[in-house]
Image (tube, rainbow, N blue to C red):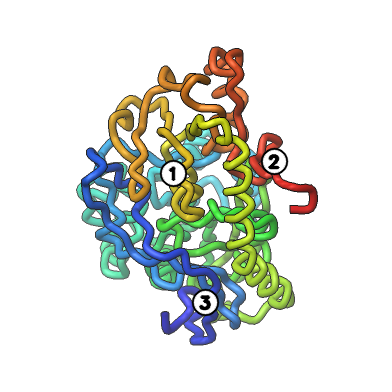
Amino acid sequence: MSACLVCGSGSIERLLDLGRQPVSSHFATSPEEAVVEHNLTLAFCNACATVQLAKPFPLRDLLPRHDWITYREPEAHLDAVVEKICALPGLDKEASIAGISFKDRTTLDRLRRRGFAQARLLDLRADAGSAEQDADVASVQAQLTPRRVEEIVGQHGSFDLVIARHVVEHAEVPSGFLQALSRLLSPKGYLVVEVPNCGANIARQDYAMIWEEHVLYLTGATAPQILASAGCAEVSIDNYPLPFEDVLVVTGRKSEAAERKARPIAEATRERELARRFAAAFGTWTDRIRSALDQLTRDGRRLACYGAGHLSCAFINFHDVANYFAFVVDDTPRKQGLFLPKNKLPIVPRERLNAREVSACLLGLSPHLEDQVIANNATFVRAGGRFYSMFADSGRSIRSLMPTGS
């Protein structure tokens, strides 16, 4: 890595090398099937304080192998987001509004219900050359090139508001993608970007937050830095609390006077120390996790994992604990019969979950789903099976089995 993906600085510090890791959505059809792997390394920019991947996975390798894979983002906060958008100075009901991807549909629907009749989702098939109506986020950021943007603006004019939910952090070249978004804006247009808030997971040292599809790991302190590439001045930054990972909504306004380069921030020292501690503690947490799993398997039974998604894949592969598990349970029929990449664990329906074979099941899904999953597996619980969460931000965290102070 030669330059920061946000500010272009060469002052890059490597934090954590996780070795060769797979694309977590590339489920294998057999244990022998080869999967794409690349080095996964986290880095820190000493100029703008942004945590990021040292080298993003190539776009071509991130494209899903299966057309049924979908992306779901939290939406409970969107009414509040739209309320703030409606109050933006100078944004009237005649404003031209664009959403970048399918993730913006529900926000646009809310705006239309509030009277913003010119809120539209960019049709990537027509406007950006994409082959799919619901192009995956990797395709979205790749197709929205400066040339494509000029074609869109030539056809529809510029936009008074552009919304981009959970796309920027996926961009292989974030600064270039943000420049493309800027070209969509009218001279005083607004840009609303939503990204995960990784600050809490960095602080509590939960490594499952690292995902090969996420290039940037922004916090409340560093998220405004992305506005510089878009030529926007900061209007507001709002944090919306959610289980496992909060979301940040960053609003900027295009301005001739806006700084075009991310700047040093007052919190840089704190961000640097948190990032360094996060990296330094990885080996210790791996040892503690293995010790907890030893406790759960000391009677000879193995473990199950619930949820065949990127969070489970990260926990098992990063900490190299696949040998503790018999299988992965998932309620998505299309995943059943496939295998998690790299660790080669089979994906099975929940009927396989029984206390004779496994002593405990580790939940690899958002904490807000845990109660429902456990209720759906009451037979396992009645037979003595136990549920724990892989994640620190859960009342059922596997960390509860670790010594006090771990």
Amino acid at dot 2: Leu
Q: Residue at x 46, y 34 (%)?
A: 307
Give the answer, above or below, for where 150 lies relative to 259.
above
Q: Are marks 3 and 1 in contact (CB under 8 Å)?
A: no
Between 194 and 279, the residue placed more toward the observer is 279
Amino acid at dot 1: Asn
Give the answer, above or below, for where 211 lies relative to 361.
below
Quadrant of residue 255 in the image? bottom right
Q: Position of residue 299 (x, y in %)?
A: 56, 30
Q: Position of residue 377 (x, y in %)?
A: 53, 18
Question: Could you tell me which secondary element the residue under label 3 belongs to?
Answer: strand
Q: Position of residue 328 (x, y in %)?
A: 42, 33
Foreground: disc 3 or disc 1: 1
> Label 1, label 2: how many angstroms apart (C-alpha)?
19 Å
Question: Could you tell me which secondary element the residue under label 2 belongs to?
Answer: helix
Amino acid at dot 3: Arg
- Whichever of labels 3 and 2 marks the residue nearer the N terminus, that label is 3
Q: Position of residue 223 (x, y in %)?
A: 60, 64
Residue assigned mark 1: 323
Residue assigned mark 2: 401
Residue 55 relative to residue 270: left or right: left
* Quadrant assignment for the N terminus: bottom left
Q: Is residue 317 visible?
A: yes
Residue 201 relative to residue 208: left or right: right
Q: Residue furthest bottom?
A: 10
Q: Residue at x 34, y 53 (%)?
A: 23
> Label 3, label 2: how many angstroms apart (C-alpha)?
31 Å
- Whichever of labels 1 and 2 marks the residue nearer the N terminus, that label is 1
Mark 3 Cα shell of 10 Å, populated few (<14), some (14-19), many (≥20): some
Q: Residue 14: which disc?
A: 3
Mark 2 Cα shell of 10 Å, populated few (<14), some (14-19), many (≥20): some
